[in-house]
Amino acid sequence: MSDKFARYPSLSGKTVFITGGASGIGAKIVSAFAAQGAKVGFVDLDADGAQALADATDGTVAWEKADLRDIPALQAAFGRLKAKLGPAQILVNNAARDDRHDWREVSPEYWDERQSTNLRHMFFAIQAVAPDMIDGGGGSIINMGSNSWWEAGGNMPAYTTAKAAVHGLTRTMARDLGGHRIRVNTVVPGWVMTERQKELWANPEALEKHRDRQCLPDLIEPVYLARMVLFLASDDAAMCTANNYMVEAGSI
């Protein structure tokens, strides 16, 4: 762990479940919790990427393969992680895909698949872990949103609609679970320079245009999303719930 970043003693020994942990922002979140001494388990469909990450962390994290669009498969994967690590005290709903699509070409089937990929599993992940958090006296749930809809971004209406709905999910579940001392928050990334973004969309023209939108001149690296997630999971954020926490360099 970089010596310029904070260590959170309250995270040591905590059990953390993360969706979509094999690559991108999710992989940074997995590594960041492992560096804090947490017991980390993640779920992903990418078996090769998941195993590579587990190997890179010297086998200190557990993972299970599941297609999160298949809710029984997600529930079963969480059950296996619980058997390995114990009940989740922290949940990070990270998994999503920002595939571009033309609104003219969206079918009902594609729309439903996009909601399953980017939204539906978040609720059922919460439903799966919340009873154990209640029994344990509290917990922290972090849902990953997106600033794409705040910016009125185009070319992906099914994605931006799902991500806008994440904020509604966060606020209503914060109310439903708050009496059990379970905190629910949304982290809102800007344009984060994951390998996927670099490969598909981060050409020089697009980057220059985006820099002009940001208040800060630097591009956003995945590590800064992981740092915000750590803070919200820690006891330092004990009075933070039902809110959005922006990591977008002032681009809205």
Image: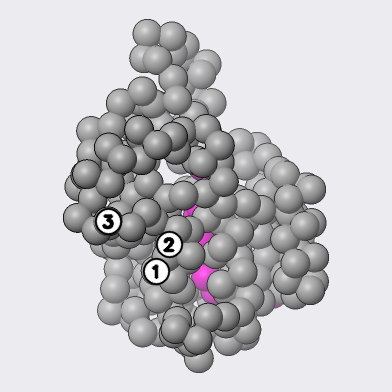
Q: Is residue 178 above or below residue 115?
A: below
Scheme by which the image is coloured:
one colour
Does the magenta run of residues contain 89? yes
User: Which marked residue is nearer to the observer: mark 3 or mark 1?
Assistant: 3
The Cα atoms of the two marked residues, 1 and 2, are separated by 5 Å
User: Which marked residue is nearer to the observer: mark 2 or mark 3?
Assistant: 3
Q: Amino acid at mark 2?
A: Leu
| Residues under numbered marks 3 and 1 in contact, where contact means CB atoms less than 8 Å apart | no
Which numbered disc covers residue 228?
A: 1
Identify residue for label 2.
225
Residue 55 in sight: yes
Residue nearer the viewer, 11 or 183: 11
- Identity of the residue furthest to the front in this view: 204
Identify residue for label 3.
217
- Identity of the residue furthest to the top in this view: 104
> Are there few (<14), some (14-19), or many (20+) residues within 10 Å of tag 1?
some
Task: Identify the mark nearer the N-term, 3 or 1.
Answer: 3
Q: Secondary structure at mark 2?
A: helix
Q: Amino acid at mark 1?
A: Met
Q: Amino acid at mark 3?
A: Pro
Tell me which residue sits at (80%, 65%) in the image.
Answer: 55
